C-alpha cells in the first residue's frame, strides 16, 4: 500500500500550485504551511491505520483458510485477532478521525473530506473483519461440536446408556447440519459451511447406525463398525475439516469482506495523498 511517504515528495510543486495566479504571496505561504502541517499531522496515524489494516487482513485470511486446523486452537486464534490487531485498528481509526487539520485553504478543506473517508474506510475494514471472524468462529465451533459428538461412540456404559447417548448424538448432529445449511458462506463462492453440514449429516447417520447395532445386541458388529467410522468420522477423509478450507483461497483472497474493505481503504488513502500532493488552485 502506498501511504503518506509521497506527501514529502515534490513540495516545490505544491508550493507552485498554492502560489499560483491570483494568489498573494502571504496567502500562498500560509496555504503551503498549512499543507506542510497537515502532512506532518497525518503521516504517522494514516501509516498506522494502513499497516494495521493489512495485518488484520492477513490474519483474518489465515484463520479463514484453516490455520490452525484444530478447532480449539482456531477459536483461540480468532479471539487473539479480535483482542489484538482488530482492537488496535479500531483505536487507530478513532484517533485518526480526531486529527485536526489547521487552515481554510482549498487543499485543507479537501484534505478534511479525504481524511473523513479514510477514517470511515478504516472503520469498514474493522466491521468486515468482525463479520469474517464471526464466520470463522462458526466454522470452528461446528468442528468442535462434531468432535464431541463422535466421541460419544467410544464412551463406555451400559446398553441403556449407549442407546440414550447415541440417540442424543444423532439428534444433535442432525440439528447441527440444519443450522449450518441455514448459514451463508462468506464469501459466497466458498464451500466451508457445506462441508461441515455434510459432515454433521454423516455423523448423525453413523450415530443412528451404531445405535441400531446396540439395540440389536450385535456387539461384535458394533465394535467393527465403530472402528471403521472412527477412521473417518466426518466422511471427508481428513483429520480436521479446516484443512480443506484452503481450497477456498483464490476466492477468499479476492472477495472476502475484509479484503474488499482493505482495497477500498487503499483507494481512500491514495486520494488523501493526491489532495495534499496536488492541491487545487
Image (cartoon, rainbow, N blue to C red):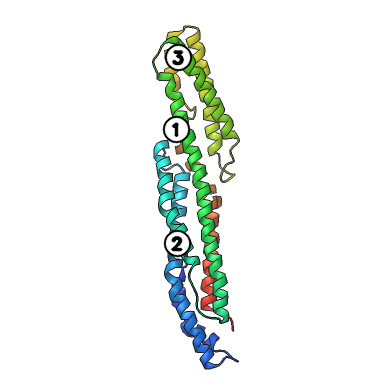
The image quadrant where one finds the C terminus is bottom right
Q: What residue sits 43% from the left and 9% below the top?
A: 219
> Crowding near pointer 1: few (<14 within 10 Å), some, many (20+)?
some
In what element is the residue under mark 2? helix
Against 271, residue 134 (above or below) is above
* Picture quadrant where residue 107 is located: bottom right
Q: In the rendering, at what x and y percent does residue 215 appear?
A: 50, 9
Q: Can residue 164 be seen in this view?
A: yes
- Disc 3 element: helix
- Give the residue displayed 43% in from the left and 61% down from the top: 51
Tag in front: 1 or 2: 2
Q: Name the residue under label 2.
A: 92
Of callouts 3 and 1, the N-terminal one: 1
Residue 57 % position (x, y): 47, 53
Whole-angstrom CA distance, mark 3 to mark 1, is 21 Å
Check if mark 3's residue and mark 1's residue have beta carbons within 8 Å. no
Query: Residue tagged by mark 3?
Result: 162
- Name the residue that disc number 1 marks: 144
The answer to which of marks 3 and 2 sits earlier in the sequence is: 2
Looking at the image, which is closer to me, 203 or 174? 174
Mark before the other along the chain sequence, 1 or 2: 2
Amino acid at each position: 500500500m502506498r501511504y503518506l511517504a509521497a506527501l514529502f515528495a515534490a513540495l516545490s510543486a505544491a508550493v507552485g500550485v498554492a502560489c499560483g495566479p491570483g494568489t498573494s504571496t502571504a496567502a500562498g505561504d500560509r496555504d503551503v504551511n498549512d499543507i506542510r502541517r497537515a502532512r506532518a499531522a497525518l503521516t504517522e496515524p494514516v501509516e498506522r491505520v494502513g499497516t494495521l489494516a493489512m495485518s488484520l487482513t492477513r490474519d483474518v485470511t489465515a484463520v479463514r483458510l484453516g490455520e490452525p486446523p484444530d478447532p480449539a486452537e482456531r477459536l483461540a486464534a480468532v479471539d487473539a485477532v479480535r483482542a489484538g490487531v482488530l482492537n488496535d485498528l479500531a483505536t487507530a481509526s478513532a484517533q485518526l478521525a480526531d486529527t485536526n487539520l489547521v487552515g481554510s485553504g482549498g487543499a485543507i478543506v479537501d484534505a478534511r473530506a479525504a481524511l473523513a473517508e479514510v477514517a470511515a474506510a478504516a472503520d469498514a475494514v474493522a466491521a468486515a473483519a468482525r463479520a469474517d471472524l464471526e464466520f470463522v468462529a462458526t466454522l470452528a465451533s461446528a468442528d468442535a461440536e462434531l468432535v464431541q459428538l463422535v466421541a460419544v461412540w467410544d464412551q463406555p456404559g451400559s446398553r441403556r446408556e449407549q442407546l440414550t447417548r447415541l440417540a442424543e448424538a444423532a439428534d444433535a448432529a442432525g440439528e447441527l447440519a440444519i443450522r449450518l445449511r441455514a448459514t451463508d458462506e462468506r464469501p459466497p463462492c466458498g464451500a466451508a459451511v457445506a462441508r461441515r453440514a455434510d459432515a454433521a449429516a454423516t455423523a448423525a447417520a453413523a450415530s443412528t447406525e451404531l445405535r441400531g447395532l446396540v439395540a440389536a445386541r450385535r456387539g461384535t458388529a458394533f465394535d467393527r463398525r465403530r472402528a471403521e467410522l472412527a477412521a473417518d468420522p466426518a466422511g471427508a477423509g481428513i483429520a480436521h475439516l479446516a484443512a480443506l478450507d484452503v481450497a477456498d483461497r483464490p476466492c477468499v483472497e479476492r472477495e472476502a469482506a475484509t479484503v474488499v474493505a482493505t482495497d477500498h481503504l487503499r483507494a481512500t488513502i491514495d486520494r488523501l495523498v493526491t489532495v495534499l500532493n496536488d492541491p487545487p488552485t
